[in-house]
């Protein structure tokens, strides 16, 4: 299942426009085909964060521990905010930020693509760890992302985009039965 949306700007109002499929509220279904994939684009504007999080919340499933889901919300918000404020700082607001979410029974993968300059995430995180300067506030969102994620990476793709990959393994609880293809 792939859900895809394009969030566009019309006279300073952000609104969803359907691309290829319709959004389905998945809450309440006990048997689903996994993985669930959702892909969408948003403009480079902090105002789009609310719409992004609303879409994300529609993907919530009852078997996901609430603490894990809230951490994933925070990670998505931080990754998106960094793309707007840093990667797209000198780019026009209509430059898209693309988001893909893949939800399985055991984990969630969130990919955030930007079109900014490459950033050495690993080097930055090592530098922050060496400085141990928690009071500066600079870069602490990335440290939080690192603590939330089971896997965190930022890579340059062949089409001159960057992909922030955040993978979160869900806490072990008794899962409900699902049908994996």
Image (cartoon, rainbow, N blue to C red):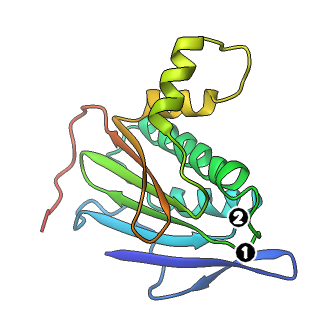
* Residue pointed to by mark 2: 44
Residue 127 badge: none
Relative to 35, is 159 on the left or the right? right
- Label pair 2/1, CB-CB below 8 angstroms: yes
State the SS at label 2. Answer: loop
- Seen from the viewer's position, the closer of residues 6 and 59 is 6
State the SS at label 1. Answer: loop
Q: Quadrant of the N terminus?
A: bottom left
Residue extending farthest to the right is: 11
Relative to 101, is 118 on the left or the right? right
Which residue occupies 86% across, 75% down? 12
> Which of marks 1 and 2 precedes in the sequence?
2
- Seen from the viewer's position, the closer of residues 9 and 95 is 95
Q: State how far apart marks 2 and 1 are (Cα).
A: 6 Å
* Residue pointed to by mark 1: 94
Pinpoint residue 114: horizontal percent, then vertical percent.
Answer: 56, 61
Is residue 67 visible to us here? no
Quarter of the image for residue 150 reads: top left
Mark 1: give few (<14), some (14-19) or many (20+) Cα within 10 Å.
few
- Count of marks placed on residues: 2
Is residue 84 visible to us here? yes
Relative to 149, is 52 on the left or the right? right
Q: Is residue 29 above or below residue 126?
A: below
Pinpoint residue 125: horizontal percent, then vertical percent.
Answer: 50, 27
Q: Is residue 110 above or below residue 138?
A: below
Pinpoint residue 108: horizontal percent, then vertical percent.
Answer: 35, 50
Q: Is residue 181 above or below residue 85?
A: below
Which residue occupies 82% across, 75% down? 13
């Amino acid at each position: 299942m792939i859900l895809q949306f394009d969030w566009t700007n019309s006279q300073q109002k952000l609104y969803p426009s359907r691309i290829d499929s319709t959004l389905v509220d998945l809450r309440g279904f006990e048997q689903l085909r996994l993985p669930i994939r959702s892909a969408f684009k948003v403009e480079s504007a902090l105002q789009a964060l609310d719409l992004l999080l609303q879409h994300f919340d529609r993907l919530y499933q009852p078997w996901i521990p609430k603490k894990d889901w809230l951490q994933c919300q925070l990670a998505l918000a931080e990754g998106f905010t960094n793309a707007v404020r840093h990667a797209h700082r000198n780019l026009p607001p209509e430059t898209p930020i693309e988001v893909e979410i893949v939800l399985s029974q055991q984990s969630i993968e969130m990919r955030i693509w930007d079109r900014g300059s490459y950033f050495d995430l690993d080097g930055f995180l090592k530098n922050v760890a060496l400085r141990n300067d928690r009071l500066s506030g600079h870069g602490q969102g990335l440290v939080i992302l690192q603590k939330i994620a089971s896997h965190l990476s930022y890579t340059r793709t062949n089409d001159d985009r960057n992909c922030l990959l955040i993978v979160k393994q869900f806490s072990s609880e008794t899962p409900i039965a699902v049908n994996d293809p």
